[in-house]
Image (cartoon, coloured by chain):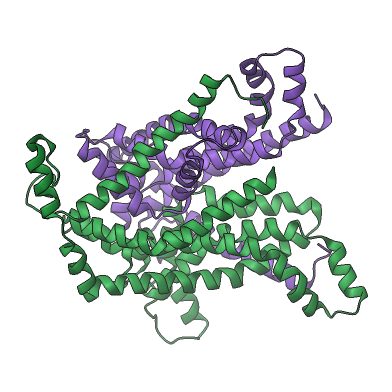
């Protein structure tokens, strides 16, 4: 691609990023609005943040959500990594087409279908709905995202490193643990983070598969949002956005260093 | 194939664990949805009549086959409310995808032409909204589009309109919400395709006297096409079944299939009708989903 930006390129980039970021910026600004009326600016205040700490249902929901996200991301990373290795490394095994189909379909499948079908499964096997059913549901769709992320790293990496280790007599498992795993680790970490945020964010699937006592933060936010825009929700959203942004930026720096280390110290 | 991985038993385990998981939690649930879509609603918990009763032996199976009917399907397809939901979902998703292409292409193009040192930052800026909550990003528009919201204040202040207009709770707001939420999914595959484009092709075209628009149309566009198709499928398929956006930004007359299914399930408590709608939605989407899977599989093969 020929380098050099025309006026058209600069304008489309500026407008595009303004479109992406202005609504979030406005939401953040209004979380510091002293007025309860969303349309009126009543001066700067942090009182909505303070009132969050008194909102026990919201805090409970946050705790449930973090637990679901942590457990489901961890299991999804394990299963997703195995699935990626199966897809990239094991060649043509029987039923591979169905397997690949089941990995890619959840990436685009409408959430209402996933949510409804999982709920009907849980009812059919008579599983009590709550924390664990939401977690199982989240593992199922986020493992596919992990598989795709890990797979893209497995496809590009230099296989001669593994062959060298095996030629030097390392057994397969040891080769995997000492050579393959460190190389694909950044992708596994990225996959875990993706699974974690997907779980934090999910409203639809959680609403279908949850039960008493396992209301997640998005469900709590949604039930308030339906009644209209409130400064408290703006404050929750701002904290959420700030936390995710910090984690993503920190992770991308860590990964860039890892990448540079890969490049400068060929093993 | 490489010898890597593991001994035969280990290899089998690597495939089997995720395979069985997906069979049990992804494939079998669909079969259950299909089964429930053929059963009748009853006032009980769970609110549908059980179909296959194996404990009754041969008689149970015979009853099962005798009770199979498609009356739920006939009901859904005969009701204009449901049919309209399907048509409107497809229409709104198609329009949104078209707008996404028109907005996403210039952004991806600008990114691919920007200096190398900017690119990782620009890429990060496109990905970042994808990581922040979908629900929150849709919610952000509620405050902007509301009757006394920022956009109306701005338009009235600028003298473009004399009094606030209804923007929230319209189909236009739903399209806007979809375009906003799915923009990263369109830009990323397009950027990946444009970034790989071989510069010398454009130089050759210019040397041979092709005007810029012609080399764009004959070189850049065809080479970006795989990215364009991938991006369109990534946006169109989930948008058809979208629930959050039509529910929060749409009006009462915004009939989208995801929302209608939600209402059937949570408000009307009709599990069988909700299942029928899920099956029909899947039938509508099976072609684009297969297309998307083939693209994914092919890009995996190409990467090897």
Q: Is residue B173 visible?
A: no
- Left or right of A32 on screen, residue A118: left
- Left or right of B111 on screen, residue A72: left
- Furthest residue toward right: B207
> Between residues A55 and B141, which one lies in front from this camera angle?
B141
* Residue A231 in the image, given as x and y percentages of width and height: 38, 54
Q: Residue at x 22, y 50 (%)?
A: B35
- State the image quarter where residue B254 is shown: bottom left
* Residue A117 in the image, given as x and y percentages of width and height: 30, 47
> Between residues B263 and B222, which one lies in front from this camera angle?
B222
Q: Quadrant of the C terminus of chain B?
A: top right
- State the image quarter where residue B278 is shown: bottom left
Q: Residue at x 74, y 53 (%)?
A: B119
Q: Is residue A188 above or below residue A267?
A: below
Q: Residue at x 26, y 58 (%)?
A: B262
Q: Is residue B65 visible?
A: yes
Q: Is residue A264 above or below residue A5?
A: above
Q: Which chain is purple?
A: A
Q: Is residue A64 above or below residue B197?
A: above
Q: Residue at x 44, y 76 (%)?
A: B152
- Left or right of A264 on screen, residue B129: left
* Residue B128 in the image, given as x and y percentages of width and height: 58, 50
* Residue B120 in the image, given as x and y percentages of width and height: 72, 49
- State the image quarter where residue A214 is shown: top left
Q: Quadrant of the N terminus of chain B?
A: top right
Q: How many marks?
A: 0
Q: Which chain is green?
A: B
> Between residues B220 and B276, which one lies in front from this camera angle?
B276
């Amino acid at each position: 691609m020929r380098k050099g930006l025309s006026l058209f390129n600069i304008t489309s980039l500026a407008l595009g990023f303004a479109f992406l970021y202005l609504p979030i910026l406005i939401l953040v600004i209004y979380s510091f609005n002293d007025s309860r009326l969303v349309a009126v600016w009543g001066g700067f205040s942090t009182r909505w943040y303070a009132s969050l700490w008194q909102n026990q249902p919201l805090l409970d929901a946050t705790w449930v959500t973090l637990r679901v996200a942590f457990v489901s991301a961890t299991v999804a990373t394990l299963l997703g990594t195995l699935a990626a290795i199966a897809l990239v490394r094991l060649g043509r095994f029987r039923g591979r087409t169905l397997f690949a189909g089941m990995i890619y379909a959840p990436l685009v499948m409408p959430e209402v279908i996933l949510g409804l079908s999982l709920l009907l499964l849980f009812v059919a096997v008579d599983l009590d709905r709550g924390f664990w059913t939401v977690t199982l549901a989240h593992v199922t769709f986020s493992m596919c995202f992990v598989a795709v992320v890990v797979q893209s790293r497995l496809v590009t990496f230099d296989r001669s490193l593994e062959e060298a280790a095996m030629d030097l007599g390392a057994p397969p498992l040891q080769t995997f643990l000492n050579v393959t795993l460190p190389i694909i680790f950044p992708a596994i970490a990225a996959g875990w983070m993706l699974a974690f945020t997907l779980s934090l964010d999910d409203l639809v699937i959680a609403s279908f598969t949850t039960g008493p006592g396992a209301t997640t933060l998005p469900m709590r936010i949604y039930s308030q949002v339906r009644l209209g825009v409130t400064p408290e929700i703006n404050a929750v959203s701002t904290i959420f956005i700030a936390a995710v942004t910090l984690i993503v930026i920190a992770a991308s720096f860590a990964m860039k260093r890892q990448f540079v280390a890969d490049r400068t110290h060929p093993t | 194939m490489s010898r890597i991985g593991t001994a035969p038993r280990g290899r089998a385990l690597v495939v089997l664990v995720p395979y069985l998981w997906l069979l049990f939690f992804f494939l079998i649930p669909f079969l259950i949805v299909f089964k429930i879509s053929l059963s009748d609603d009853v006032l009980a918990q769970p609110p549908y009549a059980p179909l296959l009763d194996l404990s009754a032996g041969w008689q149970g199976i015979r009853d099962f086959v005798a009770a199979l009917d498609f009356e739920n399907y006939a009901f859904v397809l005969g009701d204009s409310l449901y049919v309209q939901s399907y048509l409107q979902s497809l229409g709104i998703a198609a329009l949104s995808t078209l707008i996404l292409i028109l907005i996403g292409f210039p952004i991806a193009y600008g990114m691919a032409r920007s200096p190398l040192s900017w690119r990782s930052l620009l890429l990060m800026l496109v990905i970042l909204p994808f990581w922040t909550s979908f629900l929150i990003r849709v919610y952000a528009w509620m405050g902007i589009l509301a009757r006394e919201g920022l956009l109306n204040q701005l338009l009235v202040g600028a003298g473009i309109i004399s009094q606030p207009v209804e923007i929230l709770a319209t189909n236009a707001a739903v399209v806007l919400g979809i375009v906003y939420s799915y923009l990263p999914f369109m830009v990323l595959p397009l950027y990946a395709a444009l970034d790989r484009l071989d510069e010398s092709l454009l130089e050759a075209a210019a040397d041979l006297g092709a005007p810029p628009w012609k080399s764009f149309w004959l070189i850049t566009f065809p080479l970006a096409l795989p990215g364009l198709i991938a991006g369109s499928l990534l946006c169109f398929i989930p948008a058809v079944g979208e629930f959050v956006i039509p529910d929060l930004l749409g009006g009462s007359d915004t009939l989208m299939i995801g929302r209608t299914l939600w209402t059937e399930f949570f408000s009307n408590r009709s599990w069988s009708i909700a299942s029928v709608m899920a099956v029909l939605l899947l039938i509508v989407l099976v072609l684009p989903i297969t297309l998307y899977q083939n693209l994914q599989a092919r890009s995996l093969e190409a990467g090897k």
